[in-house]
Every structure is written in C-alpha cells, then in structure tokens.
Amino acid sequence: MNGILYGTLAGVALAFAALAFGFWGFLLVALFGGIGALIGASVTGRLDLRAALDAARGRRVG
C-alpha cells in the first residue's frame, strides 16, 4: 500500500470520527493517531527520538 492510500484511509477514519463524536472527538482521534504514528516510527527505527529532541533543544545534530 502506498502513501496516497494510507492518507485516504486516515482521512476517511477522521471524517467518521468527526461525524460520530463531534469536533472534540475528531481532535482526540487525530491526536492519538499522531502519537501512535510517532511511536510506530520510533519502534521501527524510522525516527530517532534522541536526535529529534536534540534538534528541538537547539543542539547540533550529526
């Protein structure tokens, strides 16, 4: 599955959340989806959290 399909499925899921739970439910689903994506990227090695935190603090990365 490619990125376009994943984006479409995520949009459909968020639309259903907005219809079923209203605006705040939509935001909650989007927030937990983002947190899940960060955790998944960290576990699979696609995101180095230590380097990201160092960059956010203004430290030189690399």
Image (tube, helix red, strand yellow):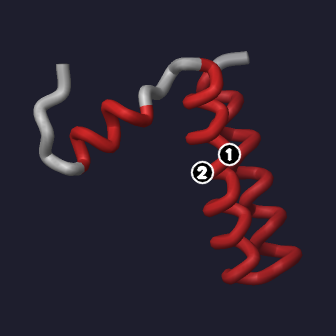
Amino acid type, mark 2: Gly
Quadrant for residue 37, please give it: top right
At x 13%, y 46%, the residue is 58
Q: As displayed, is residue 5 above or below residue 26? A: above
Quarter of the figure that contains the C terminus: top left
Q: Which residue occupies 66% across, 33% down?
A: 40
Q: Which mark is residue 54?
A: none
- CB-based contact (under 8 Å), mark 2 and mark 1: yes
Using residue 19 as the reference point, say whether residue 11 is left or right of it.
Answer: left
- Taking the view exactly as shown, the residue that stands out farthest to the right is 20
Q: Which residue is mark 2?
A: 34
User: In the displayed structure, does residue 29 sit left or right of residue 37?
Assistant: right
Q: Which x, y percent locates residue 56?
A: 24, 48
* Residue 55 place in picture, x, y as percent: 22, 40
Q: For numbered disc 1, what is the local secondary structure?
A: helix
- Residue 48, image quadrant: top left
Q: Quadrant of the N terminus?
A: top right
Neighbourhood count class around disc 1 (C-alpha, 10 Å): few under 14, some 14–19, many 20 upward = few
Which element is circle 2 on? helix
> Horizontal and vertical percent for residue 57?
20, 50
Q: Residue at x 88, y 75 (%)?
A: 20
Relative to 17, residue 51 above or below: above
Question: Mark 1 belongs to which amino acid?
Answer: Gly
> Which residue is found at the position 69% from the left and 32% from the top?
6
Circle number at residue 36 = 1
Q: CA distance from mark 2 to mark 1?
A: 5 Å
Give whichever of 44, 30 is nearer the camera.
Answer: 44
Q: Nearer the viewer, residue 13 or 58?
A: 58
Q: Nearer the viewer, residue 61 or 10?
A: 61
Mark 2 crowdedness (10 Å alpha carbons): few <14, some 14-19, many ≥20 = few
